[in-house]
Image: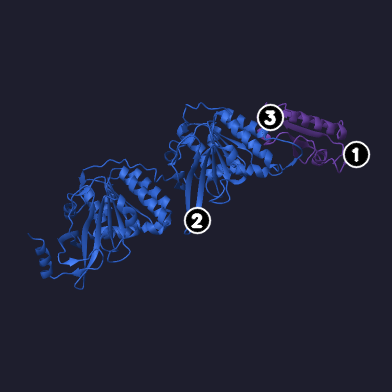
Chain colours: A purple, B blue
Amino acid sequence: MSDCEKFLLKLYITGHTSRSERAIKNLRRICEQDLSGRYEMRVIDVLEQPQLAEDEKILATPTLIKELPPPLRRIIGDLSDTEKILLGLDLLPFELDCH
Amino acid sequence: MTIENSKIPVEKLSTGIEGFDLISQGGLPKGRTTLITGTAGSAKTVFAAQFLAEGIRKAEEPGVFVTFEEHPAEICKNLLSMNWHIAEWEERGLWRFVDASPQPGYEAIESGEFDLGALLARIEYAVRTVNARRIAIDSLGAVFTLFNNALVVRSELRRLSAALKGMGVTAVMTAERTQEFGEIARYGVEEFVADNVIILRNVLEAEKRRRTIEILKFRGTTHQKGEYPFTVLPDQGIIIIPISAIELKQRSSAMRVPSGSPEMDRMCGGGFFRDSLILVSGATGCGKTLMTAEFIGGGAKKGERSLLFAYEESREQLLRNAHGWGIDFEALERDNQLRVVCAYPESAGLEDHLIEIKRQIDSFKPDRVAVDSVSAMERVGTNRGFREFMISLASFVKHREIPGLFTATTATLMGGPSVTESHFSSITDTIILLRYVEMLGEMRRGVTVLKMRGSMHEKDIREFTIDNKGMHIGKPFRNIVGILTGKPEYLNVENADRLSDMFKD
C-alpha cells in the first residue's frame, strides 16, 4: 500500500449545529496537517439526504467514514480526540515513513 | 412535547391482535408510545411485528419497523411462519424497515460528543415515505449495547420518544427484563420513553411454560387489570385469552332441547335448556361417554349438528363404542351432522387447546358441543391455568347460545368431587351425576340430576342400565342411602316405611 494514496472521507452530520461545525473544523484541521493534497472530504447532511444515511446504516452523528483507502473505518463523535482519529484513519503507524 | 387538549379523552387504536383490544378496552393509546417489556423469549418481537402486520392486514395502515437486534432479512424469514409476507408488503409500500442492527465491520471508534440524529432522521424519513401510522422499535436495550455512553443513549431515546409524538404515529417499543418479577425493564427505560407499559411474561410453573400479558399502565385511560394468558400460534401470532374480561351478557333462553334420552328429559323437567352448560360427572366407565353419544344422537334426530371433542379415547374406539350403543358416528360424519375432533390432552398447552376448540366451533358452527372429558385437561396445566381454561371454554360456548355437554371423571370409583367440578360447577346450569352403586355384591349404576338452573327437576337417584340400544333409565333406588358420598347403606323395608310414616299427618 502506498503511503501517499488518496483518502476519501465522508462526514455525516445532522443539520448545521455547533457540534456539526466542530466536527467539520476538526476534520479539516487533521486533513490539512496529515493528508495535505491527498484527501477528498465530503460533508453529508442526513436531514437533507436521509436515504444516504439509510444506505450506510448510520445511527450516530457526526459519523466519519473512511471509504478509501481500505479498510473501511467508522469514527463517531465531534472528532475532538485527534489521537483517536489518527488511529482510526490508520495514520499513526505510517506517519514516520511519510515524512 | 405538545400539551394535549385535556378535554379530549385518550383515543385508542385498535391493534387487531386477538383479545388485546378487549383487555386494553379498545387498543393502544393513539399517537403515543407503549413499552413492551419481557424476558428473553417472551414474544416481544412478535408482538411488535404483529402490531404492524395487523395494521396492514386489517386497515391497510402502513408501518415502520426499526430493528436494533435482528437483521431485517432474518425478521422476514422468521415471521413468514406466521404467514406475514413482509417482503411483499415492503414492495407495496406498506412496510418499511429501518435497519439499525449490528453490521459486521461497522464497529465505530468514539471520539468526542455525538447524538443519534442520523437514526432520528432515518426514522422520520421512513415514516414520511410510507406515510406510516404505526411504528415498532425492537429493542431499546440493544441500543445501549451499541454505544459506550449510556447517558447519551438515554437522552437520545427520550428525544426519539418526543419526536414520535410529533409525527403522530402510534408506537410500540420493546425492552428486556432480566427477571419475570422485578424491575420493569433494563436501563430503566420505562421512566423516560413511554406513557404506557405492557409486560409479557413467560413463567415456568410446575414444569410448564405459561405466557401471560399484563397492562401495567395506560396513562390517562382505562384498561383491564391483571395478567391474561396468551399463546403464540404458527399462522396467527399472539392470541390473548381474555378470561376475566369476558362479560356475562349472554341471553338466557327458555327453549328446551332433547338430551337424547326421553327419561333424562323427564328428569330435567322437559329436556336441557338450549343455551345451557351441562356437566356430567362420574367415575371411569360409568356411562359419561354414553351420555355424550346420546346427546349427539338426540341432536341428530332433530337435524342438529354436533361437534365432539374427545380427549380420552381414540377415534376408532369412540366410533366402535357409539356403534355398540346403536349410534352410528361414521354415518353422521358422512352426512355432515357431526364432527369428531380427537386429541391427546398432552399434545398442546391449555391455551392452544382452547384456541383449537374455538377455531373448530367457528368453522363447523355446530348446534351442540360436547367435550369428553374436560377433566382430562387437568393434567395439562396448572390448577390456575385449568380454571381459566374452563371459564373461557364455558363462556365461549354460552356466547354461541348452544348447549354444551362436558364430562368430568371423578377421582374415585364411588364418587366424590373432582377438580373439574370445583372449578366448573358454579358456571354450569345443569349437573348430572353418574355413580356406581354397590348392591348385594353387584355393581349397579345410578343417575341423578343434582342441579338444573331455572327449572324443576326430579330429585330421585334412578338406576340405569346400558345395552346395545343405549341408556335405559329405570326406577329410583328406594331402600338405599349414601350413594353420592360413595358409602351406600341399605335400609330394610321396615325402616323405610317407618321413616315415611313419621312424616304422615
Which chain does tag 3 point to?
A
* Element at label 1: helix
Residue at the far right in the pictured view: A99
The residue lying at 35 percent from left, 43 percent from top is B362
- Which residue carries the number 3 mark? A46
Gap between marks 2 and 3 measured at Cα: 47 Å
Side of A78 where B467 appears, left or right: left
Residues at marks 1 and 2, common chain? no
Gap between marks 1 and 3 measured at Cα: 35 Å
Residue B43's x, y, as percent? 52, 46
Q: Amino acid at mark 1?
A: Cys
Q: Answer with mark 1 or mark 3, whichever residue precedes in sequence.
A: 3
Category of crowding for the residue at label 3, using alpha-carbon neighbours closer than 10 angstroms: few (below 14), some (14–19), many (at least 20): many
* Quadrant location, the C terminus of chain B: bottom left
Residue at the far front in the pictured view: B505
Residue B370's x, y, as percent? 30, 52
Residue B361's x, y, as percent? 34, 45
Which chain does tag 1 point to?
A
Q: Nearer the viewer, mark 1 or mark 3?
A: 3
Category of crowding for the residue at label 1, using alpha-carbon neighbours closer than 10 angstroms: few (below 14), some (14–19), many (at least 20): few
Residue at the far left in the pictured view: B505
Q: Amino acid at mark 3?
A: Val
The residue lying at 44 percent from left, 44 percent from top is B240
* Element at label 2: strand
Q: Is residue A38 visible?
A: no
- Which residue carries the number 1 mark? A98
- Which residue carries the number 2 mark? B204
Q: Which quarter of the figure has residue B122?
A: top right
